[in-house]
Image: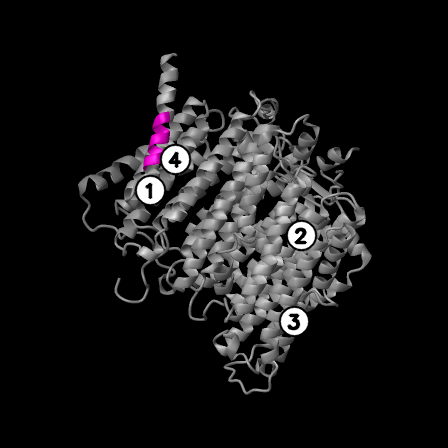
Amino acid sequence: MTVIEILDIGLAVLVLGVAAWTIAARELFAAAVGYVAYGLLLSLVWVRLFALDVALTEAAIGSGVTGVLLITAAMRLRGTDPPQASEQLRPMVRVAAATLCIAIAGVLAAGVLMMADPGPTLAPDVARHLGETGLGNPVTAVLMAFRAFDTMLEKVVLILAVIGVWSLAADDAWGSVAGPRPLAHHQGPLTFFAQLLPPVGIVVAVHIAWVGANEPGGAFQGGALLAAMAMIVLMARVVQAPAVDRRWLRVVLVAGPAMFLLIGMIGFAVAAGFLAYPDGIAKPLILFIEAFMVLSIAAVLPLLVIGPPNRPQAGPP
Amino acid sequence: MSAVALALATNPGGYLLVLAIVLPVVGMLLSLVAGGRNAERIALALMPAGLGIALVIAFGVWREQAPLVYILGGWAPPLGIALRADGFSAVMLVTAALVVAAAGYFARPLFATPPQRAEARAPLAFWTLLQGLWAALNMVFLGGDLFNLYVALELLTFAAVPLVCLDGRPETLRAALRYLLFALIGSVFYLLGAALLYGSYGTLDIVLLAEGIRAAPVVAPATFAAGGLMTAGLLAKTALFPLHLWLPPAHANAPAPASAVLSALVVKGSFFLVVRLWFDVMPGLASDAAMGLLGALGSGAILFGSVLALRQRRLKLLIAYSTIAQVGYLFLMFPLAAGSEPWNGQAWNGGVMQALSHAFAKASMFLAAGLVAESLGHDRIADLRGIGHAMPMTLFAFGLGGLSLMGLPPSGGFTAKWLLLQATVEGGQWFWAAIVLCGGLLAGGYVYRVVAPALAASPLDVRASPSRGREGIVLALAIAALLLGFAPPGFLGLLQVGRAAIVP
């Protein structure tokens, strides 16, 4: 057994251990923290599987943004009454749920273990057509060319999620801002980091989005990092979020899918059809669309985290 | 060209499939940017255009007697994604366009932006979500790729769930959260199944997957696991008994136009994908026992939903439980329509007709209940005596919708249940016939419970009479359910276009 194999086994055991701990944790907050650790370990697993794009996304979204979302929710729920006995699951229900989960995990494991090895794959197909997109990263080619329709619509899903979160606002809070108020006096380590990190983070985010054409990275990972910077300054209460009825905010929200759709429709006239790119300029067009996608993702994720607008407009500020 | 080659190339008119999806997406994005009253204007202006596109697609499928196909980006599957419209897709597209438009025009007074404000929460959310929901449904009906269909399901969930709690009462939030949990667990199961299929066959395209499964010397065990997981997930989203717990509070507490689209269309979206899975992706793969199990769950839904509908005190809850029962009939398709006998084709038509007629009838009944609740300030069935004299047109529409649920002629519901009954007799599976007849009787009971006292001559204090226009919308939907009962043979032929002839 080589050292690498021992490390891999250790990593797998660690992932399972943290997962079990997350499920067993009694405290909501502790479970959320466990989930973040689990996500980070999982991204290491993806690195070991040579899926760097997936690893980056898992770290940014699976662990990062989802983690912030869960921890924020757990913090908010701390102030509320604990669930009453009647709302808690009976032991029978817990056992049934655990049995069902184990059965499903067993079916999945059996299904995966019984698959042909190596299994059928589209990777050679992707490699053969990669040249037509002008890109060097096959993952970006799948997301932005071969399955561009899915990618465009996933951003629409995110926008619907924002509308869903906003729809939970109180009627008289509509048009106001969400999240905590900015502090009058900036001090403390959080403020320090909120002022130090974003300049670095923005550069790294733009870099990740840009190199995604040829290397691991891309619009989603870059956008998520940019979103993280926005979340830091919002949560450190250095700046406050824009009001939900600002026109520019709405434009930024829809910019990604809207530009995708527009260029997709132009494909009807000048290329092989909807979402097809003209020969030779596929790569610049893809990077152009990705720039707008980065903006939209960077706007959507913090809006999901800070929640619905929560300040009634009437009354004292 | 072979059938597979035809399914992998764009054909004339295929671009319409793109428009059917892109139009509501553009409408939703524009509505969000323009905001305020513009959201409503954009949504209402695009609805007739969307209906036009759906009708042209249906006409195209009928004329060619073959599915329309569009290859997105020029990348043929398995690398790229195909959109396909067969007969079932085409009629569902038209139904969705009609019901969404009816709900939209009906909702105008409910979701108007107040005059003193530039924008308000509920109207902006309603008009954007309604268009998002419409786009998602069109994607479900047209998607030819299992992952693309997953995106469609996500779009559908995120558009449908917030509609449940738009008025912000605590019980609606609770209902919406429960709905969200069921829907998300369903999505996860579906996605796991899709991943297993990709791992086994190296494609997510429905036609290529069917080819791969047919050509494989031994069906991969993961195929059955995938089928089971995806079916379970989709059943949770369809609220098939016994996974129906989320539906009554969600559908009964939502605003009336939202209830109408949720009950008429959204549960049909996931049902549509169960049909795609077992009839198109893995035709002939399911054992009789598995199909029988789906039929048995459907039967359980018919009996259980109907009996509970009989016991409800609120009109909207009664209608919601009736949805659980009517969804049950749809699942009789699985034991009856799988095969290449003529009676299998009849059962197919019966199932599709049930999906269509229930969509119109149920939308009409939920909107009627909405008018009743607006006029009386409540929807307690015990206090509806005499409503027939105060709101005759609304009650008439409710009764017509009820006719279709019971399966009495002339109505689409009658045609649907008659076709299913014929198939049970010709196929020698008479036990389903007993369930169909029993369900009809029980439906008669719960419709009678509302209509009979409503016709009593009893003075009733009505706060405000509904506008003629909105009553007209309710009646038009009920008449659409009725007219399906007069569908010509050519219409039933359209339903068969693209149906995989399953050789046992």
Q: Circle 4 marks a residue in which chain?
A: A
Name the magenta segment's main secondary structure: helix
Kind of residue sitting beneath label 3: Leu
x, y percent for residue A31: 31, 41
Tell me the residue that label 2 is attached to. B332
Q: Which mark is residue B475?
A: 3
Position of B115 compared to B72: left or right? left
Q: Which residues are magenta?
A: A13-21
Q: Residue at x 31, y 44 (%)?
A: A71
Query: In front: mark 4 or mark 3?
Result: 3
Quadrant holding the C terminus of chain B? top right
Position of B233 compared to B77: left or right? left
Q: Residues within 10 Å of mark 3 (few under 14, many from 20)?
A: many
What is the quadrant of residue B321 in the picture?
bottom right
Q: Secondary structure at mark 2?
A: loop
Q: Residues within 10 Å of mark 2 (few under 14, many from 20)?
A: many
